[in-house]
Amino acid sequence: MKKIFILFIFAFLLTSCNLIIQPTKSVNYSLEVDNLKYNGPFTQHAMPSTGNVKVLVVPINFYSRNKTDENLEKINLAFNGKKEDTAYQSVKSYYEESSYNQLHLTFEVTDWYLPKYGGSYYEEYSSEEGSGINVLVSEVISYFDSKYDYKDFDSDLDGYVDAVWLVYNRPSSASSDFWWAYTISASINEKWDNKKVRFFSFASVDMISDSIDASTFIHETGHLLGLDDYYSYDPKNQSGGLYGYDMMDSNKGDHASISKILLGWVKPKVISSSGEYELESFAKMYC
């Protein structure tokens, strides 16, 4: 055995093209006893990282030609499918495996929802009360209020729906700030079944390939859990902090050991003296 000395260095970035969360307070973080959900820097009311968690998934019909049974089935398989039904993993199967069977996600996929307005309305909407995406979320949650009891979607009983997914059926655009894949910490004051909505994700069904590659949805669900992006926002340095080999870097492979520590899936061995230490592999899945 070699003697190994380990130094963990972490950096939490406050802004991201995929993750929009504002810090609410400063905290002291203990690797031994804390996780992101209960004592994380930017994750108050984030989706729980352990236990049985039910998530609402709403297909949004912005483009009637794409309101098809095939697209609805793609969405369902991307979230709830078995590993063998997908090109890589479904969101559910990925997090079962990555969490060492500690996080059990169930995705309730609704019927197609037809928004009150055209896509440009939400894209261009801006006011002191919030952005167009917040307007759309409030509209969607209000519509399904009579069809679901949102108490069933608050597994940790913190007064907030654990997470919401909106999957729109028009093409995405990398040049658009609106028509892309992202996760937001919303500022919505309404309550439904005495529950608020805080964290939600937004992405196009086009980001699910015909072979059911759900990697973008797995990545954004990592944000719902409170994880930040690990890639570089510097256009001159695109290699990223983990050189692409991590789900929160380039949508590939397993979550890194530091993510699993922060999510409470493993407890670290804190090295306080020299000696012989054996390292076990954290990786469960590969590209």
Image (cartoon, grey):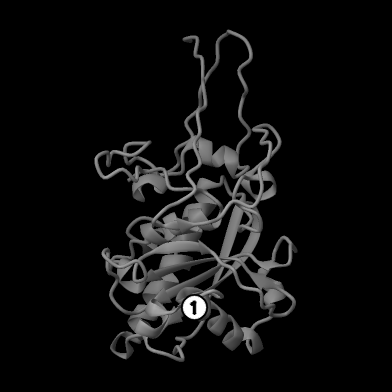
Q: Nearer the viewer, residue 16 or 126?
A: 126
Q: Is residue 194 above or below residue 234?
A: below
Residue at position x 43%, y 55% in the image: 219
Q: Is residue 245 left or right of residue 41?
A: left
Pinpoint residue 251: horizontal percent, then vertical percent: 36, 51
Q: Amino acid at mark 1?
A: Val
Q: Is residue 45 above or below residue 125?
A: above
Corner quadrant of residue 210: bottom left
Residue at position x 63%, y 45% in the image: 40
Pinpoint residue 186: horizontal percent, then vertical percent: 56, 67
Q: Is residue 35 left or right of residue 22?
A: right
Instruction: Label 1: state its secondary structure.
Output: strand
Q: Is residue 184 above or below residue 244?
A: below
Residue at position x 35%, y 83% in the image: 120
Pinpoint residue 89: horizontal percent, then vertical percent: 40, 57
Corner quadrant of residue 238: top left
The residue pinned by badge 1 equals 58
Q: How many dots with numbers? A: 1
Residue at position x 34%, y 46% in the image: 233
Q: Nearer the viewer, residue 178 or 227?
A: 178
Q: Is residue 205 left or right of residue 3?
A: left
